Structure formats: C-alpha cells, structure tokens
Image: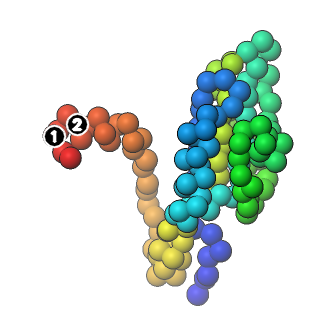
Amino acid sequence: MAEFEYGPVEIFLIGFDGERPGPDVVNAIVELVNSGVVRLLDLLFVTRSYETGDVVVLEVDEVADAYGLPEFELLEVGIAGEEDVSDFAGDLEPGTSAALLVVEHAWARNFAEALFNAGGAVLRTERIPAPVVNEIAALSGVE
C-alpha cells in the first residue's frame, strides 16, 4: 500500500504590472499558505525587462524584504526548474512580472493516495478560471 508524501501539485504563474506584486497579492499568498489548504513547495519571481526583453528570475529569499514577504517554509526549493520558468514565463510581456508558485493541494493528498491504492486514477481535470465561473453564474442568475 503506497503512502503519499505529497498530494497533487499545480504550478501557477500569477502576473502583475511592474516589478513586484502589490501587498494584496502578497497577503493572498500568505493567507492561502496559512490556511493549510495548500503547501508552498517553491516560489520564484520572474521579471521581463522592458528595455531588453531579458527575463530575470529571483528566488524568494532574494526579494523577501523588498516585497514584504514573510519567511515561507518552502518544502521543495528548486522543483520549479529552468524549463518550467521558460514555459510559464515565455509569454510574459516586457515591463511585467510574475510570481511562479508551486503548490501542493494538501486537501487532496489522502484522496489521491486512496484512489491510487484502489487501482483508480484521475482521468482528466480541467480548471475553470474564477472570472469565467463568476461571469457564467451572473448570466444564469446563479448565486
């Protein structure tokens, strides 16, 4: 019987104008981690220079003070590799930045383990962005 150390993992690229996230974005990340719903495995910040188009990748410890970040316990630093950064940050517009978060869906760890041990498998998942869900709900009158 397999025991999983981690549940499903998802990589998010969260974009914003300028060189750094605003305090609301930082607070949202902190709240998400503190809730225990996800565990933060890795966190990088990526900026595309407006002048040269070069991409600069910064580790969280390099920007924590400047961005107002608390000390995060990153569980798998480096799990987001250069290929991930290239794939996710390739479409980043010049003069913009992004946070690349690698999160484990802690809430799903036991479910994933039980499913695997029962010989089952997730056949497909699809994420529907919150703005789309809210727009559809508003059009259909769902509250």
Q: Is residue 8 visible?
A: no
**Residue 38: x percent and y percent?**
56, 61
Q: Indicate whether 77 appears above or below 45.
A: below
Residue type at tag 2: Ala
In this figure, which residue is indicated by the disc labeled 1?
Answer: 141
| Residue sticking out furthest to the bottom | 1
**Residue 58: x percent and y percent?**
80, 39
| Residue sticking out furthest to the right | 62
- Tell me, for residue 106, which label it has, or none: none
| Quadrant of the rendered image containing residue 47 | top right
The number of callouts visible is: 2
| Quadrant of the rendered image containing residue 34 | bottom right
Image-based side of 54 in relation to 91, left or right: right
Mark 2 touching mark 1, by CB under 8 A?
Answer: yes
**Residue 117: x percent and y percent?**
52, 81
> At x 61% / y 34%, what residue is drawn?
22
Residue type at tag 1: Gly
> At x 66% / y 42%, what residue is drawn?
100
